[in-house]
Amino acid sequence: MHGRKRLPVGHTPDRSKDQAKREKLKQLLSDTLRDHHEKCYTKEALKKNAQLLELNPEFYTGWNYRKLAVRHLIDAETDEAARKNLLDEELLLVERALQVNVKSYGAWYHRKWVIEYGLSPLDHEFMLLRRLLKADARNFHGWNYRRFAIEKKGVTAEEELDYSTEKINENFSNYSAWHYRSTLLSRVIRDKKSKEEILDEEYKLVNQAYFTEPDDQSAWFYNTWLLGETKADSDAEPQVAETWPENGSSISVNNQDGAFPLTISYKTIVNSEQSFTSRTLPLVITFKEMVSSVVAMVRSQPGMENLGEITWRPLSAVSVPSKTWVADLPIQLSCGGEYTVFLEVSSPPADQVTSVSFKLIIASGDSAHPRKEMDPKAFSWPGKLPSEGELEADTASKLVRLNMDESTAEAGCIKQDSTVLPRENWQEKLLEAQIEILRDLLELERNSKWPLLTLARVLAVHGSSSFTEEVLELYKLLSDVDPDHGDYYKAQHSCLYIDKITRSRDGLKKLWWDCQGSLSSGWLRCNELGLHEFKFVERLLWVQRLDLSHNQLRTLNGLEALQLLEALDVSHNKLPSVTSLASLRLISGLQYLSISHNELGSHPVDFSRYSFPSALTNQAPDHHGKGSGNIDGNWDIQAVFGGMDLKVLEIAGNTAASNEKFRKSILKALPSLKLLDGEEV
Amino acid sequence: MTTFQLEKHVNYVKSLDKKSDFDSVVMEHLRMSGAYWGLTALDLMHSLNDMDGEEIAAWILKCQHDCGGFGGNIGHDPHILYTLSAVQILALFDKLSVVDADKIAKYISGLQREDGSFAGDEWGEIDTRFTYTAVSCLSLLKRLDSINVEKATDFLVRCRNFDGGFGCTPGAESHAGQIFCCVGALAILGALHHVDRDLLGWWLCERQVKAGGLNGRPEKLPDVCYSWWVLSSLIIIDRAHWISKEKLRDFILNCQDQDRGGISDAPDDAVDVFHTFFGVGGLSLLEYPGLKSIDPAYALPVDVIDRVFYGQKS
Ligand SMILES: [Zn+2]
């Protein structure tokens, strides 16, 4: 019930009046139900039913009965005029019912049902709609009915566009009309030429609207949509974002005694040597959008065996589209030598092909970068600072910031910024005109939320790096201007910021800390950056150790693309639940994980419950099925950690860490674990 | 600060069944949903044990028709909305075994149309509310394989709009209630990748008005029921931190009838069971102390859902 005032305490409604009304309604209801069950379709019965529906149009069974009765009477009637009369009665009843409750689904549907007979003039319907949408311009039943009537009458989208213009000009804050316009325009825009002209006109309309009503949301939402339409056609873009191995890189494969596993070494974009052990050479492709299928031809020069048998699998592990796809390249050690491997990737039905090639050097015998069995303790940096004593010890490693001289970097060249799409002149012009108009409006409306936000978005779409600092500032300002949505602006800020600092080789070098005194690789440190979100992981496919500690992260979604990751520090963030770590179960080589000092166990609500496949989403992988996963009432622990190969885990500083049952479930799910919070398992 | 009047709300909900005023007749045709709202609210307030599950289950069975569908009350026609409410109540009482799941599945799958959409009943009204109802009900009964899941998903995607939201049919305006239905259904179908979380999350978080309450569409008044529709959708897509939870909590608390219990749509309006449920559900999603946690997609307590999908808790 909506909009009815509460009675003051002690005040009771007039009983006798209520009683009489109640008895009448009750009688009418039981009459209709009786007539319905007895299939009694007399004029008298229909009259009583009409009274009932006028009193309460929500009695759906009453409408059902009525349809049966009307159908019965119409089928028995041969004269078309008489049939039309019967239906006219129905239309009048609906109008009376809508006067009682204009939001009655049953009444509106009854009207559609009547119109479907095709005996009633549609002009009357349009007249009625005009009146209704004049009185209540946002009534979505009315708008839906209009769509229905338009289709019946065969009105074109172009013609309807005039109606939406009329409604928008009547009142700029009619969101329903803006929405309607967006559905019509999508049908009107047919080619590039018409798109250019239409967008130009639409911007004029929307600019006029927000200059008139700058605090109204409607035009601003429409403006954001226009902005998306102004972006370059994504069809013309390469679909592949990044790959590992990178295009133009060089990989060496060694083994020490002629047996598995192999040591795989590569030089990274920050010019440091990395290596890891594996039975095959993993191949990773990340796409800009999720794709449902991948065709990737692999060949080599000189030819290697078994390349035709490579299968690509989506990382998601369930049957949904995926951004990241992986495969294993089998290595025949007996075939030592130097190869060039070519990958030709596409995702049907798009016919775009991305070509990638890398050098593969296979050598038996001693590796140039031999690798020792990993000591779990060697990971304890940088999550916590080692004590003096530990530093001396053999297991400790010391991180030093990479020195910044531009040495001969041959591996991996940074590609053009993948977020900025090539544009045509008209797009550039439109965006620049919008920037100017928004700056003008901000002169009048200083620190006004909507123009600030829209300016930030237009600048970001424009993509010129000269705007980056301004957009970052705008998002900072917005979280002050509109603190209720502060986390939204901070998320936008984080995305832009991480884009900025990972975009170039120099940016990445600043984040890179080499590991001195240790044979294993260094860390990419994105710690203490105030990050609310972590994006652009596709630029970091080469990273094996990642420090994200001391940020504001609430989820690790997306990190699964880092298939070479073996150590991750996300301590001191805001991870609220086990399910927020779900993406990590897709990284098979992860051995060290610190999630200490997060919010695990502090939240009754599981915010990531629906962010990964489970029985609840009808996507449970077999081993997470019903029953077995919830023996301790912790199905989430089994679903996330089960099957992982972690050696070291740190969970101290979470509410859940002091829960014995929680720890036990963790240990049960991770049989390979050696150290939990620094203690041997 | 206003506090949550748990005991008064429990008493209010319990008193509803005995009422015989005009409103109770007006609501007679949707007694099944009324029972679901009231009983779930009681469970969230740890008071379901006071109710007689046997008696309620027996009444539910009297509302079932030969076709497998349930009516809103005894003698009322079957409809998909009340079929879901019936199944939800049985799940609350751990009594899903008293119904023939295949028979219900047959009724629901019979309502799916060629384009993947669902009709509410034999008369053919189409709405994404009915898709949610079908999907949620079949998932609770482990009978999703009885419908064409792919087509059902496609239809939901066709209802997606320029603002990232969803409407009741293709082309219809985004509306928070409808968004819950579509996002909830996509979540249950494992197809959330069709949702642009950032775009939709932004639209949803802009439903919060200065006073703290949430509205259902731009430039509309706030209403307690949207605390549920908006917030549950935000949680399903993990964007609930984009609104001010404190302000929303205070708005809901201010809609309580402090004297007689119950929660209304807006401060000082008349209370009803619908808004009482959505107010309590909203507070549960806001982690209000002393309430059970509610599942954002199935709209049932989390322990009930975990029992259905992962077996008995220890
Ligand atoms: Zn409401």
Image (cartoon, coloured by chain):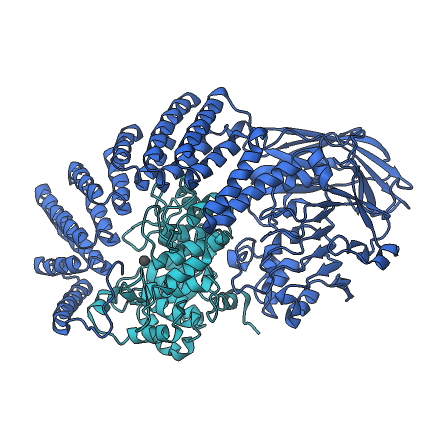
Chain colours: A blue, B cyan
Q: Quadrant of residue A579?
A: bottom right
Left or right of A226, for residue A30: left
Nearer to me, A546 or A354 = A546
Q: Quadrant of ligand 1?
A: bottom left
Picture residue at 37% right of the left edge, 79% below the top:
B52
Q: Position of residue A13 (x, y in %)?
A: 17, 71
The answer to whether residue B252 is above or below residue A659 is above
Q: Position of residue B202 (x, y in %)?
A: 45, 46
Tell me, yes or no, if residue A351 can be seen here.
no
Q: Position of residue B49 (x, y in %)?
A: 42, 78
Nearer to me, B313 or A76 = B313
The answer to whether residue A396 is above or below residue B86 is above
Tell me, yes or no, if residue A569 can be seen here.
yes
The answer to whether residue B311 is above or below residue A580 is below
Q: Quadrant of residue A508?
A: top right
Image quadrant holding the N terminus of chain A, namely: bottom left
Image quadrant holding the C terminus of chain A, namely: bottom right
Picture residue at 84% right of the left edge, 47% below the top:
A260
Nearer to me, A498 or B102 = A498
Picture residue at 32% right of the left edge, 54% below the top:
B120
The total number of labels drawn is 0
Q: Position of residue A315 (x, y in %)?
A: 63, 46
